[in-house]
Image (tube, rainbow, N blue to C red):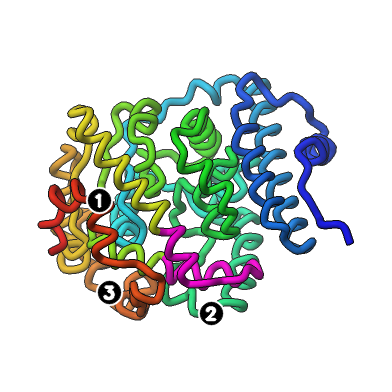
Amino acid sequence: MSIAQLNEAELLAAAEQATGLSDWGGDQSFRTGLGHLIEGVNAMQPAAAFVEQARQRIVGSLGTLLHFVDDGKRHPEILELKIDKPMIVIGLPRTGTTVLYDLLALDPSVRTPRDWEFFLPWPAPEAATWDADPRIAQINALNQQILAIAPALADIHEFEATHSSECNLAFTHHFASTQFTAEWAVPEFQKWLLSGPVPGRYAAHKRILQQLQWKGPKGRWLLKSPEHLFNLEGLLGAYPDANLVWTHRDPVMALSSLSSFLLQFRTVFGLDNDPKIVGRAVFETWTTAMERGVQSRARDASIDARIIDISHRDVIADKLDVVRKIYARFDLPFTPELEARVRAEAEAADTTRFGRLGKHKHDPKNFGIDIAAVRERMPTYYARFGALFE
């Protein structure tokens, strides 16, 4: 019996047939990640159903890229749009980044990408129909399927199409994202992704923001993803005036929490799940990211100067004060309206966002995450930032 395999030529042809387009543009750096993702999936020798699922997802992203090139030719003004002074949350997963992101998103002057926009960024969202776009129902239907298979995920993360999204979803369209390793494991792809900076990733990221900004709601971009830690030079090369917020929590607990999340998440995709294997992958991925982020700051004072460091315990203990500090650090107006919104949200402890706090239980030992090993891997990080969580 033959094993189902992905084929790059077939995937490209399928996208061209689905869209009626064939111009892939001048920058085809996406092919690097695409090739490694295909090799990684095929190396797993997965079931035919999994291969078909991966095929559909990849063809969808390839179609998006074809449409982006076409839109850019028809409407060159898209490519001239500026992304000015974005604020970007870059902390390790499970360090309070989502709570803080939601609080910062309360500022009426900011614009956050929504999950449905990063999942399906074409056609360009329009401000007039932004709250009623049919893609919202489409993504929420998928979310309900996920929660039906793994209901415990509801206590760990919010699954809602209109929720402010993370840049790792945007990176999937360049086929260079930890989202694939989170969902599909693909260990061979993970090795490549961790090997060094990915060509063209930030040009692709900026292109998606331009697409969303073109006809969609306007405002200063507020973004989030720990994946930016892998390449702060690339991030600030694309957005030199960005303001970065790095949240800190003992990495041992952060890695344990993320491993628990992924253990639940991968069941949705029918993957065999060994907690120790999941823990090892999480350990390798995010200690590498943290090391690179710390090294970037040490090498380049201009990078360090663009970052404010925030403790997870402070995010939980005094949300209003944390937001106020961030705005003061970056000389942004902390308006009475924003203060009232943050205060009201912080005091509503039973809301969907904050009602999850404390429900997610996990133990590092279950995932083979050893305190000594984590500290040994990141001595410089602990030396500089340990006071924020000890």
- Residue toward you, 346 or 54: 54
Residue lying farthest left? 387
Query: Would you say 196 lies left or right of 311 here?
Result: right
Look at label 2 and name its amino acid: Pro
Query: Would you say 163 lies left or right of 149 here?
Result: left
**Other-residue count near label 1 (Cα within 10 Å), few / some / many at <14 / 14–19 / ≥20:** some
Mark 3, residue position: 348
Q: Residue at x 73, y 44 (%)?
A: 59
Query: Would you say 106 lies left or right of 65 here?
Result: left
* Quadrant housing the C terminus: bottom left
Vertical arrangement, residue 76 with respect to residue 30, above or below: above
Kind of element beneath mark 1: loop
Kind of element beneath mark 2: helix
Q: Residue at x 37, y 52 (%)?
A: 286
Q: Residue at x 38, y 58 (%)?
A: 283
Q: Which residues are magenta?
A: 259-282
Residue 151's disc number: 2
Query: Who comes first in sequence, dot 2 or dot 3?
Result: 2
Q: CA distance from mark 2 to mark 1?
A: 34 Å
Q: Quadrant of residue 365?
A: bottom left
Query: Would you say 179 lies left or right of 308 here?
Result: right
Q: Nearer the viewer, mark 2 or mark 3?
A: 2
Mark 1, residue position: 378
Q: CA distance from mark 2 to mark 3?
A: 24 Å
